[in-house]
Image (cartoon, rainbow, N blue to C red):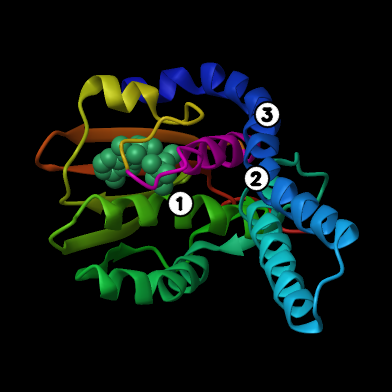
Amino acid sequence: MYNSLLKHEKMETVSHFAAAVSHELRNPLQSIKGFIQLMKEYEYSREKQVEFHSLILKEINAAEDLIDDYLVYAKPTYGQLESITVSAEIQHVMKIMAPYANVKDVEMQITDMDEQAEILIDRQKFQQALVNIIRNGIEAMPDGGTLAVAVKTSPAKVWIEVTDEGIGMTKEEVKRLGEPYFSNKIKGTGLGMMVTYSIVSQMNGQIMVDSEKGKGTEFTLEFPNFSASPKK
Ligand code: ADP
Ligand code: MG
């Protein structure tokens, strides 16, 4: 469980976050600029103009997606924490991820579920953190497999475990989780875990990682148990 010790170190990477996102935003913005410049300099046919318009729209959408995925979740939360039932959120996130799991021949299972478990969280951010972990779990199993999710509680804590039987990680790889641009994937952004670490620590949670190369990985998210707290 050495990874949880790195929490504060991970917080420092959050400051790199803005740099990471603005770097990624530069590409669509550059294209948009290019098209607009072209349209100013020449008289294009209506057909060509329509083509440019749709290309520009496409780039704007790409920029928007990026903001949705990363920027929103990097913002600190100001009071929009709410008590949520963990099982409902997990079911929702698994529904979101089902088509992706399906394509990758991955079966998602809930192996243990404390239906009563509640945590105090920003719902959207929590979903994003979970989606990023589950996506990585699915992507770690190129030949398919099972991704297990469990929710366990003690009077003080709630644990959400996401276990895959994928490629696993070396100790060094585990240590680098959450570092901006750390990715072993051809099309990876290396930002997913950074977002997840940032979100979980914003919500007073911790992440523990247990992984073995060639065997699989278990991510455990630990949060204070809110079901035990007196309600307003
Ligand atoms: P990306 O998925 O875009 O590569 P992430 O920040 O989500 O970026 O993950 C960073 C890296 O951490 C991945 O490229 C992968 O090497 C490793 N990783 C994360 N989760 C897992 C997992 N469940 N199994 C194996 N490796 C993982
Ligand atoms: Mg990822």
Find the residue positioned furthest to the right.
40
Q: Quadrant of residue 50?
A: bottom right
Q: Quadrant of residue 123?
A: bottom right
The amino acid type, in three-letter code, at marker 2 is: Asn
SS at badge 2: helix
Identify the residue position indicated by label 2 in the image: 27
Give the mark nearest the N terminus, 2 or 3: 3
* CB contact under 8 Å: marks 2 and 3: no
Respond yes or no on whether mark 1 lies under 8 Å from ligand 1.
Answer: yes
Disc number lying in front (1 or 3): 3
Ligand 1's quadrant: top left
Q: Nearer the viewer, residue 112 or 168?
A: 168
The amino acid type, in three-letter code, at marker 3 is: Ala
x and y percent of residue 6 in the render? 45, 19
Say which quadrant the N terminus sits in: top left
SS at badge 3: helix
The amino acid type, in three-letter code, at marker 1 is: Asn
Vertical relation: 103 (above or below) 131: below
Give the left or right position of residue 98, taking residue 42 as reference.
Answer: left
Vertical relation: 81 (above or below) 18: below
